[in-house]
Amino acid sequence: MGKAGWFRIIPFAVFMAFIGVQQLLEWSVVKGWLDLTAQQMLYLYPLKTVLVLALILFFWRQYNELHLVDFKNLTHTVASILLGLLVFVLWVNMDWGITALGESKGFDPFLVENAASRNLLIFFRLFGAALVVPIMEELFWRSFMLRYVITADFSSVRIGTFTLTSFLICAVLFGLEHNLILAGMMAGAAYSGLLYWTKSIYQCVLAHAVTNLVLGIYVLQTGFWHFW
């Protein structure tokens, strides 16, 4: 695999590690070992966002699969935006308890009374979800994992190379990464399908970003915090 794989794994691994840290802290609070409020726990997300963004920027020169020129293909770009919207619509309509991995408390910034702190949390949540997460996840899932399943020498595989095995494995694993498993599988399959058509990681980032941004706006408008 070499260094190229780690450049794409590390930001994702750090992001996932924070989920584990949060669960450990919550468990410690339940046990009475720590005295942390739900409001204080919200600040883990800005910390996670900043750290993962710093890693992405540090490794940025290694991501030679990211080409801004891809957005000049307006057909692909418009399709990516529309796909992102479609995934959002399907996501909020696939909120089925039977397909959820436990109960999600979500991210409710309105637990914080101070307006400035609350707005800062909202900013970091939207910024992280709509920019940092799409880049981090698409580099890991669509650039690295889809190709790594084909061969350990993943960089020798062209971006957008299709095999049924890699498609199915990554769709399932992408779903398991999320609380709404079936919705996650749907989204993973959709973004991979977009990659096979456009051969562009950036188009997948765009679609993913649209989904997450619109979902964030939807959550703020409706108060359905479990989607966050």
Image (cartoon, rainbow, N blue to C red):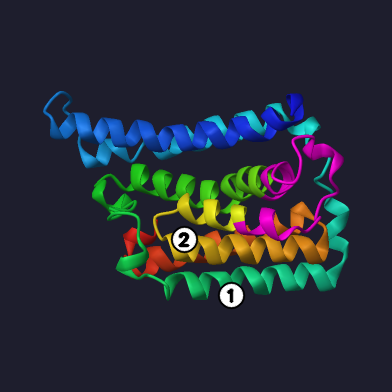
The reply to whether the magenta stretch includes residue 113 is: no
Say what amino acid the circle numbered 1 marks.
Leu
Indicate left or right for 17 with 208 as reference: left
- x and y percentages locating residue 117 in the rendered image: 35, 42
Nearer to us in this view, 180 or 221: 180
Q: Quadrant of the N terminus?
A: top right
Q: Quadrant of the C terminus?
A: bottom left
97 w.r.t. 151: above or below? below
The numbered disc on residue 216 is: 2
The numbered disc on residue 195 is: none
**Residue under the point 75% across and 53% down:** 202
- x and y percentages locating residue 131 in the rendered image: 61, 49
Say what amino acid the circle numbered 2 marks.
Gly
The numbered disc on residue 86 is: 1
The reply to whether the magenta stretch includes residue 163 is: yes
Q: Earlier in the sequence, mark 2 or mark 1?
A: 1
50 w.r.t. 108: above or below? above
76 w.r.t. 131: above or below? below
Q: State if disc 1 and disc 2 touch (CB < 8 Å).
A: no
**Residue under the point 73% across and 65% down:** 194
Q: Nearer the viewer, mark 2 or mark 1?
A: 1
Q: Could you tell me how far apart the alpha carbons at marks 2 and 1 are, in whole angstroms?
A: 15 Å
Element under disc 1: helix
Residue 112 shows up from this direction: yes
Q: Over which residues does the magenta segment extend?
A: 142-168
68 w.r.t. 198: above or below? above
